[in-house]
Image: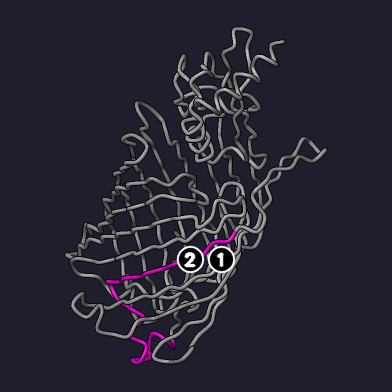
Amino acid sequence: MLNKLFLILVLMSFVWGNNLLIVSSIEFKGHQITKDYIIQREIQHPLDVPLDSSLADQDKDRLLNLGIFADVSWTMVPLEDLTVILQYNLIESSLRILPAASPTYEEEYGWSFGGMLMIRNFRGKNENLTLAGSTGARKSYFLSFNNPWIMGDHVSLRFMTGRSNTIHPFLDYEQNTITSEIIMGRYFGYKHKASIGFELEQKTFTGNIDTLEYLSINPMGSYSYDTRDVYRDPSKGLLITQGFFSILDWEKDKNNLWWVQSYSLYHSLNKSIKKLTAAFNFSFLTSFGKVDEVFVSWLGGAQNVRGWSIPTKSVYSNVDKNFRFGNHSAVFSTELRQTIIPTKVFKTQLMDWKQEYGLQLVGFIDVGYTARDKKDLFNFLPMLGTGFGFRIPFPMVGTFGLDFGWGYRDGSFVDQALHLVVGQKF
């Protein structure tokens, strides 16, 4: 009898809206590690009001954006008094503790072999704890800790300390860095996010002719306006980010400030589960003050203009390639992201293992300018890269994939490159 009455109410609610479906209770289930309050603070649908599916969907997106759940859904459970329970069904990611040893590849430096212990959702409090080290192209070790809501109203804390040794990609220097940083952040609502902190850093560049040493305190901060629905693969929304990084050297008069701006827009072109999304990004980097040669930036690689390889020593020494190096840059990127296999979660019989799977194809165009002097930024012909790639969902990092592109400039294709992509470019 209860189910029949509830069915009648549901049918009536489709005619007159959801006004008859009063939410008298909110529950969540399926979690084993995550503390209840971590989930509760993301659920904002009020009690004793008609069910609002848009608010329930927003709660679902916020829970997914924590990055600790493989899947989230919600449903209505009827009660004898003809009200409903709003129930959120959670599937935690099985890949929570990752002890790993494997080869790794970085475009700038090459192959390394590393070991890592990463604990996601540490103590069930959505904290991340990582201890890692590597040898090979990068000799390093570091310890990091992140709590996205350590106190108050969305106050976050991130701490990292470590050491790294690499060969500069295009200068005759071996670079050794010892660093410690601490960053505090805060949400203002769910759209406005800000952070501030500093880094203590010692850098040594050892070459055949000379050795350069830098001991600095580096203030840094950022602000972002974020209306994306789901961070890992947005269907809609806007992301605007402003950030700065300053190097205040204790021993030399070589202080400088770097300012980074990024503007991203996402819009799905259909409403199918196999969605087609258009994504656009414009980023701008500029610097103020004296910037030594060892800190010069470049274009090429997965993070700016794809289809161009990371510059080498021979490229850097070629005066005809000066258009690839500078302290100021502007890059425009556009992508079409076609979902081939929507992200799903399946369970295996072994230890109740839950695995995500999915597939997304990406077509991209990148256009970039760079120069050593700001006034010359758009005086050179742009670097253009175009190509395609794929993304698969991957716990802890969001997505993983490969991009292959061709570099184009001055009427001809002059380069091509395969890029390993961890997360989305934007």
> Splitting the image into 4 quarters, where does residue 337 fall?
bottom right
Image side of residue 188 versus residue 290, left or right: right
Q: Considering only vertical position in the picture, is 184 above or below 243?
A: above
Give the residue number, with chain letter if any, for mark 2.
335
Q: Are marks 1 and 2 in contact (CB under 8 Å)?
A: yes
Who's the residue at 69% across and 51% down the image?
Answer: 357
Who's the residue at 63% across and 19% down the image?
Answer: 8
Image side of residue 94 versus residue 421, left or right: right
Q: Amino acid at mark 2?
A: Glu
The residue range painted magenta reads 314-338
Q: Considering only vertical position in the picture, is 229 above or below 85?
A: below
Q: From this viewpoint, is residue 249 visible? A: yes
Image side of residue 269 versus residue 297, left or right: right
Foreground of the two, 258 or 46: 46
Foreground of the two, 9 or 426: 9
Q: Amino acid at mark 1?
A: Val
> Splitting the image into 4 quarters, where does residue 46 fall?
top left
Image side of residue 225 versus residue 131, left or right: left
Q: Position of residue 27 (x, y in %)?
A: 58, 20
Number of numbered labels in the structure image: 2
Give the residue number, with chain letter if any, for mark 1.
362
Distance from disc 1 to disc 2, alpha carbons, whole Å, reads 7 Å
User: Reading the chain from its start, which is encountered first: label 1 or label 2?
Assistant: 2
Within 10 Å of disc 1 (Cα), the crowding (few <14, some 14-19, many 20+) is many
Q: Position of residue 18 (x, y in %)?
A: 51, 24
Queried whether the magenta region covers residue 5, the answer comes back as no
Q: Position of residue 269 (x, y in %)?
A: 50, 58
Queried whether the magenta region covers residue 324, the answer comes back as yes
Who's the residue at 46% across and 24% down the image?
Answer: 45
Q: From this viewpoint, is residue 101 visible? A: no
